[in-house]
Image (cartoon, helix red, strand yellow):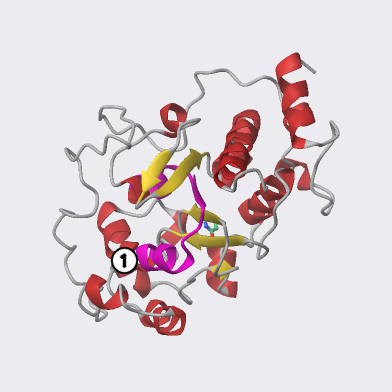
């Protein structure tokens, strides 16, 4: 184990072996940087590169807005959809109304193939908010975010920094309905759904947001971004610090990058400790 990894493990207060205790074959889910090779700095991210300047969203450039000027809605499919989400109305909703609104939403084509919308789960007064991309098959079936394999890894990642689902943690997705075949949500789908996430954030007022993967980071920061360049920085969403890291599903496919995600979560934990004035 090299010195860097050793110090990460020490800082985490963890022994060198730390993995999910799941069924046989769960090795792929282990969040155990000690077992990973030191990742190369040039690893490829999950999403294809969109050619755009790499920016620190603290500067908030507006050349490529993702929300305000999202493209015209896609043509209406045969199945009826309702008009776009009324951001002003959603902005005034409490939890119950918001949840009902999300469950009934038909504002984009993602409603067409979902079994159910997946609003979010956890402590509504949490300090920590984790934002993923969108529900997968299991989440679509169960109505809860991150309950499949990626969710097991997310639980393990959270455990590595001493937090757990539902306990001072809220988990939400950028889009609330499953994209068919787990494809990446389209820009207009992200834009259509954003008022729901914005309202959740306004209601929770977490101390820190962790954006999991590129779509979540782009939606929150309203700018194009690459995880590899955005790691280790603190961005801002409406006065709330945002830290970005790799999406757990990406880490399942690219376990070499788990060590980087671990570093990111250590960074997030340090930020949280600073924000909480050392209480954490
Ligand atoms: N991936 C996500 O981004 N969200 C989920 O809820 C599950 C998998």
Question: Going 21% across and 46% down the picture, which residue do you hit?
Answer: 65
> Residue 103's quadrant in the figure?
bottom left
Instruction: Measuring from the top left, give residue 142's x and y in whole percent.
Output: 60, 73
Q: Residue 110 or 224: which is nearer the viewer? A: 224
Q: Is residue 202 left or right of residue 71?
A: right
215 in the magenta segment: yes
Above or below for 41 versus 163: above
Above or below for 264 versus 132: above
Above or below for 68 versus 7: below
Q: Is residue 231 left or right of residue 91?
A: right
> Can residue 86 be seen?
no
Q: Residue 134 or 222: which is nearer the viewer? A: 222
Instruction: Measuring from the top left, give residue 95's x and y in whole percent.
Output: 45, 79
Q: Residue 113 or 160: which is nearer the viewer? A: 160
Q: Quadrant of the N terminus?
A: top right
> Can residue 108 be seen?
yes
Instruction: Measuring from the top left, give residue 184's x and y in whole percent.
Output: 40, 51
Q: Is residue 269 left or right of residue 67?
A: right
> Residue 230's quadrant in the figure?
top left
> Residue 83's quadrant in the figure?
bottom left
Q: Residue 165 or 83: which is nearer the viewer? A: 165
Q: Which residue is mark 1?
A: 195
55 in the magenta segment: no
Q: Is residue 132 left or right of residue 51?
A: right
Start and end of the magenta stretch?
197-218
């Amino acid at each position: 184990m090299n010195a860097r990894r050793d110090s990460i493990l020490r800082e985490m207060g963890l022994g060198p072996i730390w993995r999910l205790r799941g069924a046989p074959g769960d090795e792929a889910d282990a969040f155990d940087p000690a077992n990973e090779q030191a990742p190369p700095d040039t690893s490829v991210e999950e999403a294809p590169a969109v050619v755009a300047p790499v920016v620190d969203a603290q500067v908030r450039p507006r050349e490529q807005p993702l929300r305000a000027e999202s493209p015209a809605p896609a043509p209406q499919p045969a199945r009826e959809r309702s008009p776009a989400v009324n951001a002003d109305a959603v902005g005034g909703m409490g939890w119950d109304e918001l949840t009902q609104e999300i469950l009934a939403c038909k504002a984009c084509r993602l409603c067409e193939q979902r079994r159910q919308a997946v609003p979010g789960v956890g402590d509504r007064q949490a300090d920590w908010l984790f934002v993923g991309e969108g529900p997968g098959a299991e989440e679509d079936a169960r109505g809860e975010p991150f309950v499949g394999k990626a969710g097991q890894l997310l639980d393990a990642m959270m455990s590595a920094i001493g937090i757990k689902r539902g306990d001072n943690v809220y988990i939400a997705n950028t889009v609330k309905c499953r994209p068919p075949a787990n494809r990446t949500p389209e820009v207009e789908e992200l834009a259509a759904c954003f008022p729901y996430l914005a309202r959740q954030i306004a209601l929770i007022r977490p101390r820190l947001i962790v954006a999991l993967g590129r779509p979540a980071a782009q939606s929150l920061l309203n700018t194009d971004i690459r995880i590899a360049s955005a790691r280790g920085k603190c961005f801002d969403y409406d006065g709330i610090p945002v830290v970005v890291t790799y999406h757990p599903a990406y880490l399942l496919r690219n376990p070499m990058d788990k060590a980087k995600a671990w570093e990111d979560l250590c960074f997030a934990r340090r930020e949280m400790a600073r924000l909480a004035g050392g209480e954490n």
